Amino acid sequence: MDDITVLILGKPGPAQQDLLKNLDSRIRILTAESSQSAAELAPQADVLLIWNPSRDLLQAAWSTASRVKWLHSRSAGLDHVMFPELAASPVPLSNGRGVFSQSLGEFVLAAVLYFAKDFPRMRRSQQAARWDPFDVLEISKQTLGIVAYGDIGRAAASRAKAMGMRVLALRRRPELSAGDPHVDRMYAWDQRLEMIADCDYVVAAAPLTRETEGMISDAEFNAMKPGAVIINVGRGPVIDEPAMIRALESGKIKGAGLDVTTVEPLPAESPLYRLDNVLLSPHCADHTADWLDDAMRFFLDQLHRFQAGQPLQNVVDKSRGY
């Protein structure tokens, strides 16, 4: 392939910039941090790397990117950057699906253990210097259900299965997971309530699309066991937040482990901050010491594939948004 110009939308950190230094001399790197510079530089770009998930920045670049042949998003979620013109374009878009899944799978397991062993009660007793024995739950006798069984769901399932849990999973095309060793039973999309009713922990791992927004709402919370826990490692608006808060405040469900919320940063007045039955992460469950390095390494592998004319990984179905 001829010389390639990559326009990075946003500014990678020093460590990620170091990873770019050993690129083939035929690859030129440009960086845009404002809409104006994005629009000015985009006509030169063969590739757009969406490092900063800003729709305004991408739209500005897209408006003048007359020769772009491929776009890659650092993140897996695309709801912050997708717009109609991009969705309608034949230019392929890939994302970071799978790069951060392992850490999110660990967060799911952490949330399961947090509620099963009642770590908050242990901590309160320790701080009060109070000897307070109580019964805990054995998670190998419990069931984990996953709503939207993709890379994050598989990462959660493998860890739950290793701990002896029964694992159920829901996906649009369950036949794609036939024979999966980490799942005891697959459910079709229209069997959501049936699966949820059988779970001690319900993991929301769905991307945000028109179809998934608010998909876990009053009907789903009413179907859950009284001792169930909801865990969200997908996108905040996939769960109807007011419905979840009602279920938490009323005791309809036992608790929630949340890495994402509907509005981020979560406003100080949100009840989620004061509810004792909520484990809240500020959307950093996948922020390991080298998570951005991993994202850049994945892009560079993709770039080598693009340069060699090989098939790209993680090509997105833009009509579906994932």
Image (spheres, helix red, strand yellow):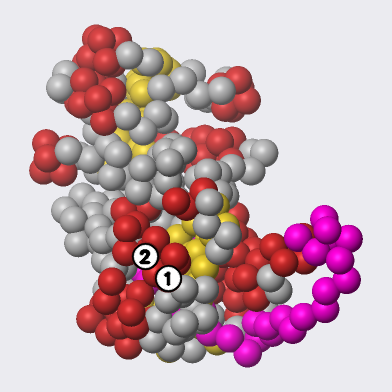
- In magenta, the rendered stretch is 124-152
Quarter of the image for residue 113 reads bottom right
Q: What residue is shown at x 35% (from left), y 48% (from top)?
A: 262
Q: Which of the image's four quarters has the C terminus?
A: bottom left
Q: Which of the image's four quarters has the N terminus?
A: top left
Q: What residue is shown at x 26% (from left), y 31% (from top)?
A: 55
Q: What residue is shown at x 83% (from left), y 58% (from top)?
A: 128
Q: Is residue 187 above or below residue 244?
A: below
Closer-to-camera residue (140/7): 140
Q: Secondary structure at mark 1?
A: helix
Q: Position of residue 229 (x, y in %)?
A: 50, 72
Q: Is residue 141 magenta-colored?
A: yes
Q: Is residue 256 above or below residue 209?
A: below
**Gap in angstroms between the C-alphas marked 2 and 1:** 6 Å
Q: Is residue 182 above or below residue 63?
A: below
Q: Is 119 left or right of 221, judged from the image as shown?
A: right
Residue type at numbered disc 1: Ser
Which numbered dot is residue 305? none
Can see residue 26?
no
Q: Which residue is mark 2?
A: 246
Mark 2 nearby-residue class (10 Å; few <14, some 14–19, many ≥20): some
Can see residue 296?
yes
Q: What residue is shown at x 23% (from left), y 21% (from top)?
A: 61
Q: Position of residue 18 (x, y in %)?
A: 61, 22
Q: Is residue 94 above or below residue 117?
A: above
Q: Secondary structure at mark 2?
A: helix
Closer-to-camera residue (33/283): 283
Q: Which residue is mark 1?
A: 250
Q: Position of residue 119 (x, y in %)?
A: 71, 65
Asked if the residues shown at circle 2 and circle 1 are in contact, with their CB atoms under 8 angstroms apart, the answer is yes
Residue type at numbered disc 2: Arg
